Image (cartoon, rainbow, N blue to C red):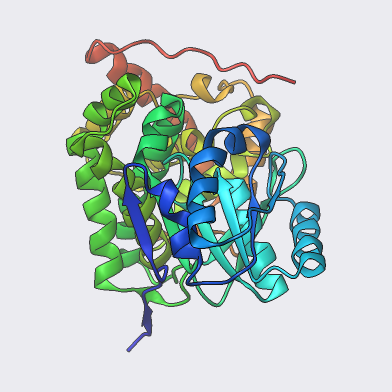
Amino acid sequence: MPTTVLSSPAHYVQGKNVIAELGTHLKNLGSTPLLVADDIVWGIVEDALGKGFADAGLAVVRVGFGRFATPGAVDGLVETITSGGHDVIVGVGGGSAIDAAKAAGHLAGVRWASVPTAASSDAPTSALSVIYTEEGEFIEYRFFPHNPDLVLIDTQLVANAPVAFLVGGIGDALATWVEARATARGTGSTMAGGRPTHAGTALAQLSWDLLHENALAALDAVRAKVVTPALEAVVEANTLLSGLGFESGGLAAAHAIHNGLTAAPQTHGLSHGQKVNFGTTTQLVLEGADAEELADFVEFTTRVGLPNTLAEIGLTAENTAELRAVAEAACVEGETIHNMPFPVTPEAVVDAMLATDRIATRVRVERSLPAPQMHHAKH
């Protein structure tokens, strides 16, 4: 019988204004934490976080962060940890800052914590980091022997963040069940290192269900900058359930296509979740999903504000070279697309992307949804 694996963070904390409690939770992990946050994030959290640190008797030491978790950024953090004698590193902000902190904590041999300030991805809970070039092109996944020692997310910070961040997180999380069920039907391995557990697959489906029930109301809450039960449900779905679901349930075509899209300059400026959502729609086409399920997915994601056409990710059917490059990158050896329960070729991916564009455009007309708008990457 195959080995199954479930991986999870040691401690997960979610709630309104819990950023003030960060110092109390970190005190259980170490005495000299290093905080990693860019200037914008730091300006948002410094006061509340600082008071909590003072109450816990911890010094506040913060280092800035750029845009992407690059090899150089990770190595720089390792040097800072070592020279400063830090025993825990804390990624505060977006997915790349958190990924860089995790990778640096592993290399330096210290504990690490994730403190997302928006529910924009499922990266915070995982035992892996996604490493990019300075231009934002995917390089590799780095895997670690354990998950974060702490994940803490303040839902008032999520409510105060731009609504686009929550939209991107929903796009990332919606892929979780679609990819997990495909992995379960196949023979591939999950990011946790074995076949999916029933628990991992069930958590992926729960994330999907909570999003369909609460996403639109949660977006309304963020527009009003308030915390509601719908927002709490979506934050948990985006962060905890999707994180556990993707890592222990399995990734498949959606994230592989996302990784391929990072190499297309036309897609630059789009969030991780936006590109993933086009990948999820394409995966549904690739696997021959039920026509009604596919149409419902196009409608729901359009109402959320996620791209499901080529124009919305900056491409057209005439960009044949770029589409071919995306498909080839998505199908390289070791990519998660090979968790699909059937062989996938670059030719099949190109065909599926072109078909996705036509299907989504038609569904949007039939269901009186907004027409796609062309994404123009800033250079």
Q: Please tell me which residue lies in front, 219 or 314.
A: 219
Residue at left offset 45%, top offset 39%: 118
- Is 16 situated above or below 89? above
Residue at left offset 58%, top offset 61%: 58
Q: Is residue 17 visible?
A: yes
Q: Is residue 346 visible?
A: no
Q: Is residue 237 left or right of residue 118?
A: left
Residue at left offset 65%, top offset 71%: 87
The image quarter containing residue 131 is bottom right
The image quarter containing residue 292 is top left
Residue 94 coordinates in the image, percent (x, y): 55, 43
- Is 104 situated above or below 170? below
Q: Is residue 198 left or right of residue 44?
A: left
Q: Please tell me which residue lies in front, 13 or 133.
A: 13
Name the residue at the bottom extreme.
1
Residue 93 coordinates in the image, percent (x, y): 55, 43
Quarter of the picture holding the N terminus:
bottom left
Please give the count of numbered marks on the rendered protein. 0
Residue 279 coordinates in the image, percent (x, y): 46, 40
Quarter of the picture holding the C terminus:
top right
The image quarter containing residue 301 is top left
- Is 6 situated above or below 269? below
Residue at left offset 36%, top offset 85%: 2
Q: Is residue 297 left or right of residue 156?
A: left
Residue 164 coordinates in the image, percent (x, y): 45, 26
